[in-house]
Amino acid sequence: SIIVFGSINIDLVATAPRLPVAGETLLGEDFFKIPGGKGANQAVALARLGIPTQMVGRVGADSFGAELVSNLQAAGVQTDNIFVDETVSSGVAIITVGHTGENQIIVIPGANGRVNQEDVERLSHLLPAATALLLQLEIPIAAVVAVAKAARNANIKVILDPAPAQSNLPDELYPLVDIITPNEVEAGQLVGFVVDGEKSAAKATEILLQRGVKSAIVKLGAKGIVCATAEETFFVPAFPVHAVDTVAAGDAFNGGLAAALFTGLSLNQAVIWGAAAGALAATKLGAQTSLPDKLTFDAFLKE
Ligand code: ADP
């Protein structure tokens, strides 16, 4: 199986004619409750593609937590190793959106912020039966580093999505990573110069390789993907699609990438699978709702 170790969140979205000012009570319009968290999104992306997937993380002992877990189960994700933390709320994002698209977001890490060594130990028992571990940066970095070490010792491939963007990753993390997959903003933060397009992305991959990752992939949205290893650097174009919402395109990419590697395909083919999953996610609204299932995915690749 593939293990995803990361965040599980619920987005509470309110829409209103405009954003309220401090102290104001404003009549809004619609309310949406949307499961998310980069970890959970990537787990759903994998499960939809038919890959046996285990989610490891934390939710709170509240109704959101129960809902988030059953949502993952419904997508086919194994949830036995999601710990219900009695001391804290589930991870929540409170999002307000005004008519012109402007927004205000408060993220409460809640249970995601409590992920720790105990979770790493629970996950370690799953490693012997696993082929890959997917990581992101929405849980404490100490847990990310510890689990990457455990995976390396067990000879399990580590795929790190360095999102949300962060400028200071611990030096010791890079050599534990098989594949790092930043987008342009994240790559720019990691390397300290603007990454915008193929040329600067290729430069960024060189630096990431020097820091010790085995492969570096920079996702350039509709512009494609740059992928580099010690042996080669190659470019894969994005699939031409009519994009309506790129939320979770990056998570879909990582799901597609890992699914291909799980299936035994080459890195080059895996990047193409990632691009296909990302493109399909961009054609639909929403985060988890936009992630493609296996039928849609296979049909798209055959076209
Ligand atoms: P993130 O969501 O992490 O910012 P990107 O926006 O680069 O990452 O999207 C991830 C991948 O999804 C891209 O590398 C690309 O393959 C695919 N993708 C995203 N947006 C589009 C688009 N408009 N058209 C085609 N493919 C896209």
Image: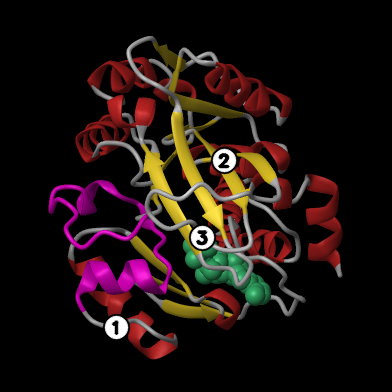
Q: Regarding mark 3 in the picture, which secondary structure is present there?
A: loop
Between marks 1 and 3 in the image, the one whose residue lies nearer the viewer:
3
Q: Residue 67, position in %: x, y?
A: 62, 22
- Residue 32 placement, left or right of 93: right
**Residue at (26, 59) in percent of width and height:** 166
Residue indicated by mark 1: 194
Of all residues, the one furthest to the bottom in this rendering is 199
Residue type at tag 1: Val
**Vertical position of residue 193 compared to residue 22: above or below:** below
**Residue at (61, 54) in percent of width and height:** 252
Dot 2 alpha-carbon crowd within 10 angstroms: few under 14, some 14 to 19, many 20 or more:
some
Of all residues, the one furthest to the front in this rendering is 24
Estimate the spatial distance between the alpha carbons at disc 3 and disc 2, rounded to whole Å. Answer: 15 Å
Residue indicated by mark 2: 12
Estimate the spatial distance between the alpha carbons at disc 1 and disc 3, rounded to whole Å. Answer: 31 Å
Estimate the spatial distance between the alpha carbons at disc 2 and disc 1, rounded to whole Å. Answer: 32 Å
- Residue 264 placement, left or right of 279: left
**Residue at (22, 54) in percent of width and height:** 174
Q: Give the mark, 2 or 1, whose residue is nearer the N terminus.
A: 2
Q: Residue 146, position in %: x, y?
A: 22, 32
**Vertical position of residue 222 compared to residue 28: above or below:** below
Q: Which residues are magenta?
A: 164-192
Residue indicated by mark 3: 19
Residue 244, located in which quarter of the rendered image?
A: bottom right
Residue type at tag 2: Leu
Dot 3 alpha-carbon crowd within 10 angstroms: few under 14, some 14 to 19, many 20 or more:
many
Between marks 3 and 2 in the image, the one whose residue lies nearer the viewer:
3
Q: Which numbered disc covers residue 52?
A: none
Is residue 246 at all visible to an observer of this figure?
yes
Residue 193, located in which quarter of the rendered image?
A: bottom left
Of all residues, the one furthest to the top in this rendering is 86
- Residue 191 placement, left or right of 178: left
